[in-house]
Amino acid sequence: MIKLTIFGSTGSIGEQTLDIISKSKKGAFEILALTANSNHKKLAEQALTFKAKYAVIKDKTKYLELKELLSGTGIEVLSGNEGINRVASLDNDKVVAGISGSAGLESTYISLKNCADVLFANKESLVCAGQLLKDAEKEGNSKLIPLDSEHNAIFQVFEKHNRDAIKKIILTASGGPFRTFATEELKNATPEQALKHPNWVMGKKVTIDCATLFNKGLELIEAYYLFDMPLEQIDVIVHPQSIVHSMVTYNDGSTLAQLGPPDMRTPITHGLYWPSRYNGRSIVEPLDFSQIKSLDFEEPKHNLFPSINLCRHAVKLGKSYPAALNAANEVAVDLFLKGEIKFLDIFKLVESYLESHKPIEVKSIEELLKLDLEMKREAQEFLSRT
């Protein structure tokens, strides 16, 4: 039995994880804790359904309502960052890090140090604190298991024992809803258009990042830390069908790829059962290759979507630059969703903030979390003046 905590259980990743568990063999998992930001009603339903030992609501104003909903059930109710960090310290075998943005960083770090394998869909954690998390992984003798479809694909075909024979890793990108747009069309692109991803169903932030290709740039930074690969050996290719989820090319000319339908339940299932393989009734139907008419690949349009190159630049600059880029992007996406800036302004504002950033060396998670808040305040003020 795998003892499991799910951070962000009411979000997209959390709900899909619970869907998989509901279809798995009875007794395969024991849910120690579920956490949510503010959706206390859904959290209470999940905690009851899956017999969680703890239910944690980050929004402290919802604590009493959650406690009332779970009164008499034996489920312990906690709140705030303190509650989240407490369940990160439980005797978990695995945790699912489904909290978006830098808010999920501390619980990921604590879980790794406490020997729990972390299934993470939160790329911002590695972008902002890649080396710190890798150090925690080593200290806790734990494992970072990526749930992003691209990194999970690489994880599955990356022959660690043959890493010297690896020529490059190739991240695939759908191209998002604006793949065929011209500059003039992008000038007036709306949040509603940007949120209509052609292949995937995700949260708002990551969906906008897919539209700007910042998602792919952040994934490039993530791959740099996760697989310890030089930037020069990490490529990005646009693949609109989202069937080939990423590839690893070897020096002998072989390229290994992981293929599957565009369904996040596949990488989540892989992560939940790793290092074994799930062996039950189908959760996701495998590909029917007789129905696949074509697999297309093309270079990203870096002139229209400079996000990937901005992310490469931030990694090369090092220090706190990747965290600064992430903070500026989070603020810019929020402003775009509110209709306060145009789509193309996202690139301009992130680049401008990156140029103004005064880098520092970050030596602890506490320093980084403090810096992240400062950078977001600074980015908000900077972008409002720009």
Image (cartoon, grey):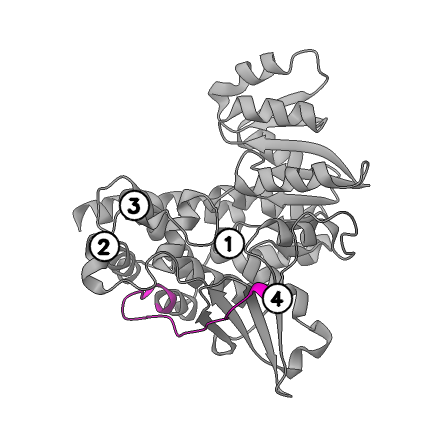
- State how far apart marks 2 and 3 are (Cα): 13 Å
Q: Which residue is mark 4?
A: 289
Q: Please give left or right for residue 177 compared with residue 339 in the image.
A: right
* Residue at point 22%, 47% (across, down): 341
Q: Return the x and y of residue 112 as percentages of the image width and height.
A: 66, 49
Q: Quadrant of residue 9?
A: top right
Q: Would you say the residues marked 4 and 2 are in contact, meaning their CB atoms lie under 8 Å apart? A: no
Reading the image, the residue beneath label 2 is 345
Q: In the drawing, what numbered circle is on residue 123?
A: 1
Q: Are marks 3 and 4 in contact (CB under 8 Å)?
A: no
* Above-or-below relation of 44 to 239: above
| Nearer mark to the viewer, of 2 and 3 | 3
Examine the rendering and report whether any part of residue 330 can be seen. Answer: yes
C-alpha gap between disc 3 and disc 4: 34 Å
**Label 2 vs 3, first from the N-terminus:** 3
Residue at 52 percent of width and 72 percent of height: 170
Q: Residue 191, which numbered label? A: 3
Assign a secondary structure to mark 2. helix
Quarter of the image that includes the N terminus: top right
CA separation in Å, label 2 and label 1: 23 Å
| Front one among 138 and 308 | 308
- The amino acid type found where label 4 is placed reads Phe
Q: Height in image: 71 above or below 320? A: above
In this view, the mark in front (4 or 2): 4
Magenta residues (range): 289-309
On screen, residue 153 above or below 326: below
Nearer the viewer's eye, disc 4 or disc 1?
Answer: 4
The disc, 2 or 1, on the residue closer to the chain's N-terminal end is 1
